[in-house]
């Protein structure tokens, strides 16, 4: 009886490890270009308004100007992306509240981002969803899913700048064209993954599709036991970052 159950469980796992890459390879699409549409507060989808509008006065309290809410449409297939964008002109720090709306599910996170003259970009966010592909070269992404209070997340970002910025100057964006910074990031997603062999440009050059290599690696990273191991390693890495701040004499505001 136990042997039968184990065999059936093994067969099910094996089926998932075959079926998931097949499904991903057939369905994954990422837009090659994006044209964000600035929308008024009256046009906000309810799920986006709930996440973004309360942040406007909160971020303004510590120096962030609200630059508007942008509808990026379906950057990833079947997922509408809405972004509330902010800029602290005194520090050249940027913030984005990103809401991803898919059928039956809505995810959101807040991120603070600073680019330096050295070429480094530091991003500090509370996104609890780990990426299934490598982060961009030259970009250090630190994820603290348990830090939901915006002021605490920003204080943490500023301390991480002290640690990783090496005294380099923060790079601003042209006033009135700040959203171009986020457009470059989205439009670089497909090409850099094509270089890694994860994706390829479609024949109509409108989207990037997953290669078999990309489909297998992304799908398997999302399945057990790899998913649990990845979350454990990411959690330990963030614990190490907080510990390093404590060692440097900086209080770690968010205990893991």
Image (spheres, helix red, strand yellow):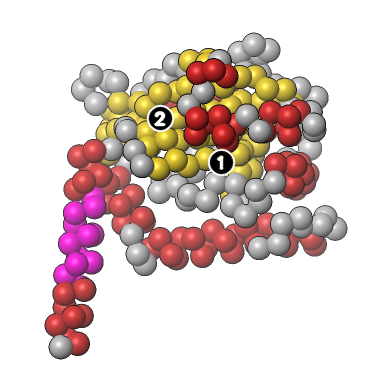
Which quadrant holds residue 97?
Answer: top right
On the image, the x and y values in percent for residue 44 come to: 51, 23
- The range drawn in magenta is 10-21
User: Left or right of 17: which side holds 113?
Assistant: right
Q: Secondary structure at mark 1?
A: strand
Quarter of the rendering occupied by the C terminus: bottom right
**Residue tagged by mark 2?**
80
Residue 100's disc number = none
Q: Earlier in the sequence, mark 2 or mark 1?
A: 2
On the image, the x and y values in percent for residue 1 come to: 15, 88
**Spatial CA span between label 2 and label 1:** 14 Å
Residue sitting nearer the eye, 163 or 150: 150
Say if 6 sits above or below 176 in the image. Answer: below
Q: Is residue 14 magenta?
A: yes
- How many marks the image carries: the answer is 2
**Residue tagged by mark 1?**
109
């Amino acid at each position: 009886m136990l042997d039968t159950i184990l065999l059936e469980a093994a067969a099910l796992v094996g089926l998932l490890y075959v079926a998931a890459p097949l499904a991903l390879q057939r369905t994954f699409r990422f837009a090659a270009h994006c044209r964000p549409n600035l929308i008024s507060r009256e046009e906000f989808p309810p799920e986006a308004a709930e996440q973004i509008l309360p942040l406007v006065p909160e971020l303004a309290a510590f120096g962030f100007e609200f630059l508007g809410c942008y509808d990026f449409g379906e950057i990833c297939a079947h997922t509408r992306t809405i972004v509330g964008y902010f800029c602290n002109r005194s520090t050249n720090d940027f913030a984005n509240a990103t809401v991803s709306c898919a059928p039956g599910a809505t995810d959101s996170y807040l991120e603070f981002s600073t680019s330096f003259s050295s070429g480094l970009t530091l991003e500090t966010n509370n996104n609890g969803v780990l990426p299934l592909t490598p982060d961009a070269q030259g970009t250090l992404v630190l994820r603290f899913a348990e830090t939901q209070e915006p002021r605490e997340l920003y204080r943490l970002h500023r301390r991480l700048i002290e640690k990783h910025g090496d005294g380099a100057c923060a790079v601003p964006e042209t006033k009135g064209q700040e959203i171009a910074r986020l457009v470059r990031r989205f439009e670089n997603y497909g090409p850099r993954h094509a270089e890694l062999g994860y994706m390829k440009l479609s024949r109509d050059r409108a989207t990037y599709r997953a290669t078999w290599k990309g489909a297998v690696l992304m799908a398997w990273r999302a399945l057990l036991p790899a998913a649990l191991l990845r979350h454990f390693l990411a959690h330990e890495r963030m614990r190490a970052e907080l510990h390093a701040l404590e060692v440097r004499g900086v209080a770690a505001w968010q205990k893991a």
